[in-house]
Image (cartoon, rainbow, N blue to C red):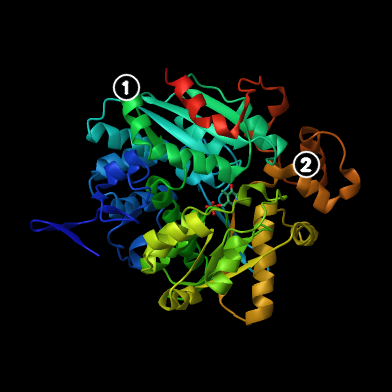
Amino acid sequence: MFLTDGQETYMKYKSTRSNYAVTASEAIVEGIAPDGGLFIPTLIPQIQISDYMNLSYKDLAKKVLALFLADFSQEEIDACVDGAYDEKFETSNIAEVKHLESYSVLELYHGRTLAFKDMALSILPYLMKTAAHKLGIEEEIVILTATSGDTGKAALEGFMDVDGTKIVVFYPSDGISDIQKRQMTTQEGHNTYVYGIKGNFDDAQSAVKKIFVDDQLKSKIKSKGYRFSSANSINIGRLIPQIVYYIYAYTEMLKGGQIKENELLNVVVPTGNFGNILAANYAKAMGLPIGKLICASNENYVLSEFFKTGVYDLERSFKVTNSPSMDILISSNLERYLAFIGEDVKEHMARLNDSKKYTLSSRGQEALKDYYGNYATEEETLEEINSLYQSGYLLDTHTAVASAVYKKYLKESNDSNKTLIVSTASPYKFTKHVVHAIAPERLSGSEFKLMKTLNDLTSVKIPKVIEGLENFEIKHPKIIEKTSIQETIESILR
Ligand SMILES: *Cc1c(COP(=O)(O)O)cnc(C)c1O
């Protein structure tokens, strides 16, 4: 779809729930549309892979972001990319593609918080600052973030001490790994605020989304010199940088001879809020030869069921699993996919709200053929880690869910396309579960002691950023009721 302004045709971002449309800068600063919808690009740029060959990650990112950020200059984009993808990443390649016997793995966890969230959250603060400057925004931007464990830390690191911003994070106090929790509660920075809530990720995300559309609260804080924005993947500024690594992985595999020109590549994505796999969906729509999009869920399998049945059904109980960053029932970004396939988003969201369930139109059901959805149980996840460990590769629980689901897909389909598994976290972020999988007899002591055990068992080094984590000073000990999220925010912004 094109929006025209006089003679010019350029990309804007419109709400999934109305025709409200803004520039890229405005979409990034606003985070969510005033009608509660999410911003989506009004057109999908098309690419030729040959134009993207032999580029470093950063150079490729500069080209891809320029396609989407129509009101940013190339100089501005270059500065954002150069600032974000620096020596904070453990590998100068930024993302690594490894080739195992049955598939390739795209390792996205070499950033400073050890999860793929760093791929987008290291650049979002730069994009946001640039956008705010272009728009002449004077208020301080308050980033409200709900996290299932990884977004919080990555957002805190990204926005720490960034002038003109404050960052407030809410994490479920039970249900994240000790390492994730310690990473957040020890956060430095004069503008950082972290709270555990007595509730789950969905509680945190719903409360935060409600605040974004509360006009009264928004004008109240505006009078004090603040405005809200989001670091969650509801912000389009999170999604666009994620498209980059799919194109990068494809060019790397082409260069390495793992695939041939135009060969279809399946991608398997361990999925929670549907942000990562949606970026793959956009890359495919841009012309990247992606075959099946394989959506891997854990036992909170509302999404994999959706891809099987075309029905999104929230009526189920929430389970805390050993892949906690995917413990989500309300996958926000699916709303963007509904818009992508031409569904009546507003109608479905209304149904979800009043009867906890919606069903796709028959045309929508047809579109689901691009996808395969399935889930892995906690037990299957552990078995998968152990089986890969035996053959010499260490993966975390989330990536193991993807690997186990891929094996189910192969059994059902006999699809012989090459496949890329997206690896979303370092095994050290979920040390306890990983040790449980590969050497249950060694499972004793704290998660910090187990880091040493895992290091003994494998040749994989403990990432520098979490060395000594157990001795860092706890700066954010507070746990609050889920009903006091708004009150807590107001008390920060007094
Ligand atoms: C956030 C996260 C996911 C889920 O990604 P979505 O974009 O929310 O689908 C999977 N694995 C890990 C380790 C994560 O941190």
Residue drawn at (28%, 39%) of the image = 76
User: Is residue 53 in view?
Assistant: no
User: Is residue 23 in view?
Assistant: yes
Dot 2, crowdedness within 10 Å: few (<14), some or many (≥20)?
Answer: some
Amino acid tagged 1: Gly
In the displayed structure, would residue 365 be above or below residue 73?
below
Drawn side of residue 479 relative to residue 247, left or right: right
Which residue is disc 2 drawn over?
Answer: 455
Question: In which quadrant will I find the C terminus?
Answer: top left
Question: Foreground: 107 or 485?
Answer: 485
Q: Position of residue 474 (x, y in %)?
A: 65, 21
Drawn side of residue 203 relative to residue 396, left or right: left
Drawn side of residue 13 relative to residue 428, left or right: left
Question: Foreground: 434 or 80?
Answer: 434
Residue drawn at (32%, 65%) of the image = 47
In the displayed structure, would residue 259 be above or below residue 437?
below
In primary-sequence order, the first of circles 1 and 2 is: 1
Q: Position of residue 257 (x, y in %)?
A: 52, 70
Q: Secondary structure at mark 1?
A: loop
Which residue is disc 1 drawn over?
Answer: 225
